[in-house]
Amino acid sequence: MAKEKLKLALYWAASCGGCEITMVELREKLLVVDQVADILFWPVAVDTKYKDVEAMPDKHIDVCLFNGAIRTSENEHLAHLMRKKSKVLVAFGSCACEGCMPGLANLYNRQSIFDYVYLESPSADNPNKVVPQTTNKMAEGEIQIPKFYNTVKTLGQVEDVDYFIPGCPPQPPMVWSVIEAILAGNLPPKGSVVGANEKTVCDECKHERKEKAIKQFYRIYEIIPSTTQCLFDQGIICAGPATRGGCGALCTKVDMPCRGCYGPPPHVVDQGAALLSAASSVVDADTEEEARRIVNQISDPIGTFYRFGLASSLLHRARLTKV
Amino acid sequence: MSNSTFEPRIIAFLCNWCTYTAADAAGVARMEQPANVDVIRVMCSGRIAPMFVLKAFSEGADGVIVSGCHPPGDCHYTNGNFKTFRRMPLMENLLAQYGIEKGRFHWGWISGAEAPKWAELSRSFTEQVRGLGPLSWKTQLASKED
Amino acid sequence: MMDAGRHPNIKLLTNSDVTNVSGYVGNYKVTIRKRPRYVKEDLCVGCLQCIEHCTYKEAKFPDEFNMGLGKRKPVYLPFPQATPQVVLIDPEKCIQFKTGKCKKTCAEACDRKAIDFEQKEESLEVKVGAIIVATGFETFDATKLPYYGYGKYPNVYTALEVERLTSASGPTGGEVVLRDGSHPKSVGIIHCVGSRDEKTNRWCSRVCCMYSLKLAHMIKDHTGAEVYNFYIDMRTPGKSYEEFYDKILSEGVHFIRGRVAPVSDWAIIPEEEGKLVLRVEDTMIGAVRRIPVDMVVLSVGLEPQADAGNVASLFGISRSADGFFAEAHPKLRPVETNTDGVFLAGCAQGPRDVPDTVAHAGAAASMAIGLLNRGEVTISPTVAYVNEKLCSACKTCLSVCPYTAITFDTAANVARVNDALCKGCGTCVATCPAAAIVGRHFSDEQIIVTIEGLLREPAAKTAEGAHP
């Protein structure tokens, strides 16, 4: 054996499993991964347990691809554990990078979420008002489940992260290019975003863009857009201008507006605010009343502008009434 | 709970040619203004990115003011203030969703000749925010899950 | 005017409009529409034979220069001192244009074959480094104040009309006469018509007191009539102007401090029959008086031209609250605008008389020459630039710049900011969703650290009452 195999770990925290699918989407290249790497820990595919990881020496793992947001104490525990045991910790996918969909729960807190899910939802059938507790004494002893946090955090907000691979999920060609870079020892400075472009999605999008003057905002079901003209120009809020490229503009290719899953471009401090500013600045209104009328058409600003990045936005979450 | 000893921290983004000039004139004329308001000068209210407002709140501001030249005709750069009145109503809606009370964000127009209006705004807005209490966003950001 | 017309470095384009201006200081491209005068300028020598031989034996149409008091033919010279000294044909009055069936005696009479009915409108594009806007003023439209009776009573005139009556080259050869040709025995001159008035124009038009005094003198000199000047204040600053006022006072002109309302022909005593009665509060004696006169002269004020808004947009300049073009600074920069390379001269910027206009225009010319001779322009450093590594051609910025300083370079596929046009407002910086536009000296980074610094609490001093 000429070269030592790369010791690879993959973990999923609060996520949907899509990042695991993206690994599968490497297709035949997954076999190459298997050739060059030893997968030491990958709960979805490999039968290694937490205690096996805890038993490893520190920094034993070469690279850990950590996807999913930090929703519970277990997620956080594993974040710290994987950091300890890995030379390189990578925030893989939008959940780990910026919070993604789980991050939208930051509009609420544990109490309001539990109340709705377990007690108030139309399909709840819970006459004894049972809600999860972190500990429960049973005849056999005390069992514990992880604590559900009030606030969803990104991996970077709880641990020191070496690289960020954005995307929901990261696109397989980009993932592959990062794996190649890792194998070649050819990585940029710590803290960089890898597997994505410096320019925005617009750079990859083939729709024709012109000067903008928006008289009305449309949601995607409200009009049938032109397939050649820029969606933003037509009043559909496309996050493309404020989103890092590298995905190949897959969504706009099929005339759906970009949702912003690759996160902000370099230098943009708050993706939602950047998109909000762009969208409102080009509203075709010469009075405050008209401007207000048009922007009030956006019924859910956080959902529209912070769909993927609420947890990583400047404010992180809606106000907690009791801290 | 009494907020009588709470001193609000307010950040005001003012355009150079109108509101900043008014604030300067108010100072020169010794009009009474509270120390709670810190002014950041920009050349035009059109420079004020929504991100600045969010940044101010996230860094601990209890209230934020944005002020520029009266539309339609006063803007030194012709229509920079048009972009302001297009952006700020959407900011109001966004801040409401974030749970930041309407009384903590004021945006409007004060011309260079309206120094008393600035002095009055700085006083009344400080009292308004004082009544709302500390926002403590930085504390919220730093809080640990128990 | 003739000197300017002949100067080798000056190209005079008359009967022309500017239709488009693009570019920036030192590099303007101006598109000019030259309307046809139907006479070849380089052939006509101003002999006026064409006018003499026009199909119309008598002049029939109102003469604009003489404020409609005189008549002209369809082919005419605008005024005796016109530069260039070339006639023109009014296509709306000329029979050839209206019916196509004129004998064209004018063309026959011209031994230089200068008349050209086929002449077409021309469009030319010139490259200039500086622009001076000297588009002048309009006089106030006195029909807007019905109580002065202009347009209702035949013998109510505006000052500009009376100016033409007193002129030796005017429609009456210098005779100050009423509409029926007789000389007035009494004349009332009403100051501040459309000036110093909350209902019309707030400003003082600066020149009217002096011209009203001049007209008082001319009228008295030509006719020996009793002349009454009705004023609010006598404004005669300027070199020798007070002395001129003294002179008119000594000539026996009557001065009444008060505003006239109305001018009417309602006589209440026999002496007022057939006259125009001016009812006025004489504020000096605190009594209302009725002064019957034969002729009323309205000293109309100066206002911006009706198309000033369009002209301002054309040249990218702004207007003051009164509608005249805006100077860059009311005290220190009277001939510059906020648009580099565009200067103002004369009444286009605000009412002023001839000596002041000459000074103002001289200043504008000097600034323009200085700009061109220096060959380079110092601009403010607080301008924006596009980081071309980050610009992804979303084109959001293109429509937000008040100065159209941002253009899109299709070949390079990026937006670009023109340093000379950019005024540093920062609107594009705040708009760019990719943070690809940087505002020098007011960058996002600078403002962010300012916010952080202002809100950073020293350890000991926390706001009392705040949550821990």
Image: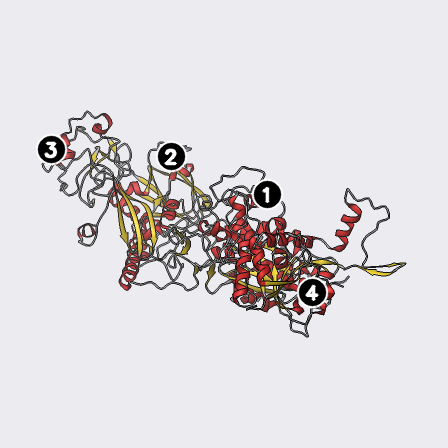
Res A86 seen here: yes
In the structure shown, which secondary structural element does the residue marked by tag 4 occupy?
helix
The reply to the same-chain question for discs 3 and 2 is yes
Res B31 seen here: no
Residue drawn at x 29%, y 33% as measured from the top left:
C179
Task: Specify the subunit that label 3 lies on.
Answer: C
The disc placed on residue C272 is 2
Q: Is residue A67 left or right of residue C116?
A: right
Q: CA distance from mark 3 to mark 1?
A: 73 Å
Pick whichever, B64 or A34, lies toward us. A34
Type of the residue with mark 1: Gln
In the structure shown, which secondary structural element does the residue marked by tag 1 occupy?
loop
Residue drawn at x 76%, y 48% as measured from the top left:
A117
The residue lying furthest to the front in this view is A1
Q: CA distance from mark 4 to mark 1?
A: 34 Å
The residue lying furthest to the left in this view is C111
Type of the residue with mark 3: Ala
Q: Label 1: how many residues lie within 10 Å, few (<14), some (14-19) or many (20+)? A: some
Type of the residue with mark 2: Glu
Residue C406's place in the image compared with C263, above or below, is below
Query: Disc 3 or 2, which lies upstream in sequence?
Result: 3
- The residue indicated by pointer 4 is B139
Task: Specify the subunit that label 1 lies on.
Answer: A
Contact (Cβ within 8 Å) of mark 3 with mark 1? no
In the structure shown, which secondary structural element does the residue marked by tag 3 occupy?
helix
Q: Label 4: how many residues lie within 10 Å, few (<14), some (14-19) or many (20+)? A: some
Type of the residue with mark 4: Thr
Q: Quadrant of the C terminus of chain C?
A: bottom right
Residue C12's place in the image compared with C66, above or below, is below
Task: Specify the subunit that label 4 lies on.
Answer: B
- The residue indicated by pointer 1 is A297
Please identify, in this view, whether the residue under mark 3 or under mark 1 is nearer the observer. Answer: 1
